[in-house]
Structures are given as C-alpha cells and as structure tokens.
Amino acid sequence: MEEYLAYDNHGRGVVLIGHSQGAGILKSLVAKAIEGTPVQQQIISVLIPGTTVAVPEGKDVGGDLQSTPLCHTAKDVGCVVSYVTFRADAPPPANSHFGIVSEPGMVAACVDPAALTGGATTDAYLGAKGAGMSSLPMGPWTTDGAPVTTPFVKVPGLLSTACASSGKAHYLALTIHAQPTDKRTGTIVGDIVYGGMTLRDWGLHLIDMPVVMGNLVELSNLQAKAWLAKQPPSPAG
C-alpha cells in the first residue's frame, strides 16, 4: 500500500475490492492501516463480499471497523459494502462459515448492492459453464437448448436479492424468479459441492460477486462521481 501511495496514486480516490480471503485481508488493512489516517479520505468505497464484517446490532459501524460505516446509498463514500450470499430457501445453518458473529451484541453486516443502485432485480454476470470446479456444471440455459457462445450470461429479471436474517445469521438472500412461460432455466449453480454433497454452510460463496456484478460496477461509478464532487477544486495553473 505504501509503495502504491508513494509512486502511483497521485491523490486519486480508491475503491478497494476483494472477495473471500481477499475481502478478509482488506477488512484487516482498513482497520489497521487506513482508519484514522489521512489515506481514509481517499477511500471511495470498500467492496468486500464473501467475508463476515461484524457491526453492533442496529448500527453500521463500531465492530470490525471503527470509523468506516456501511453504505446506505449510492452517493455514500468512504463506506463499506459487505454481504454473504445464501439461497432464500436455504438460509445459513448453525455451523455456517459466514453471516454469524459470536461476539455478544454483534451481527454480520449486510449491504445489498442491488438495493443501493435502485434495482428490483440484480444485474448478474454468471459463468456460462458454471461457477468453477467446486460447483456443479451449469446445465442448459434455456428449455429449447439454444447454444451459449459467450463466457458469461446475463439473466435480466430472473434474480433478486435482499438482506435477511435467520436465527443468528444475517445474509444476502438470493431468490430465483422462474416463470413457466419463460424459456430460461430456473436452475442457477453456485453451491460448493464436495463428494456429491452440497455444503450448505458455504452458501452461494462461489457467486457472491457474479450475482450482483453489474450492480457493483454501477455502484463504483456512482460513488466515484460522488467522491469527486466532494473534492476541493484543483488550483489553477
């Protein structure tokens, strides 16, 4: 970080993006090296899905991060977007790897990128062949078997997300809106499968980002514009 700031940043705003282990590393970086320093003013947003960020119940700052609040609108800057994705009909079990905080009074943060960008459904970019080696392969995308020749598939109106809670878990619930009159599949892969068994404690970890990828891109653009608007004008000359 120090080398980047010294030689390459030139005072620009920064969006920090990471998932899973990378998200955990960024959470630690913000807490230990950015909060309370001048660099914090350069943070446009911190996008760290796929890791659990603890916040006091009913609040948006004061747990894992002491001065970086959760984002509430697309115009908020210097804030964090964190969530862990599970199917709406398969909430996190008691042994879940994500979405559950053991400390009393703390819960897992959930910020829905689709809600921030005003979408009733998500802007997903899904892998045409599936979600990787740990997931089941994706079957036909349509009932008529039309070939897919692109590496990613968009599914307008098919998926929606919403922050939800179940027991001690707080998470992003994904709903598939399959319709009998829609030729598109109602099956979306993304669960981790090991030895033929679906690992429910991981949820849809493999597609945390793909299910809202377009929303995250749009959000970053809107927040960057909001951050720039808050900056003092450059001196003439």
Image (cartoon, grey):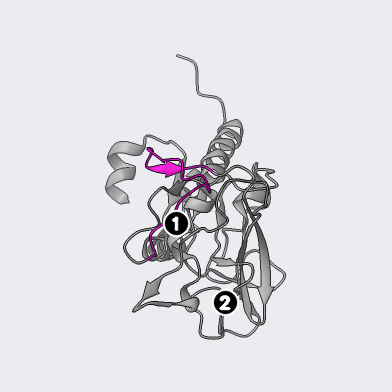
- The crowding category of the residue bearing disc 1, from other C-alpha atoms within 10 Å (few below 14, some 14 to 19, many at least 20), is some
Q: How many marks?
A: 2
Q: Nearer the viewer, residue 156 or 120?
A: 156
State which region is magenta.
Answer: 135-154
Give the image location of residue 169, x and y in percent.
61, 77
**Magenta stretch containing residue 152, yes or no?**
yes
Q: Would you say 12 lies left or right of 195 here?
A: right
* Residue 157 location (% of width, % of height): 64, 45
Q: Earlier in the sequence, mark 1 or mark 2?
A: 1
32 vs 20, nearest the viewer: 20
Residue drawn at 34 percent across, 67 percent down: 134
Type of the residue with mark 1: Ile
Query: How far across and how far down the image is residue 137, in percent?
Result: 38, 60
| Residue carrying label 1 | 34
Say what secondary structure mark 2 lies in. Answer: loop
| Residue drawn at the location 45% of the way across and 14% of the way down | 237
Q: Is residue 138 left or right of residue 83?
A: left
Which residue is at 56% across, 38% downward? 218
**Disc 1, SS:** helix
Image point (56%, 44%), residue name: 155
Above/below status of 195 relative to 159: below
What residue is shown with label 2? 92
Residue 32 falls in image quadrant: bottom left
Query: What whole-number distance in Å separates the C-alpha atoms at marks 1 and 2?
Result: 31 Å
* Magenta residue check for 229: no
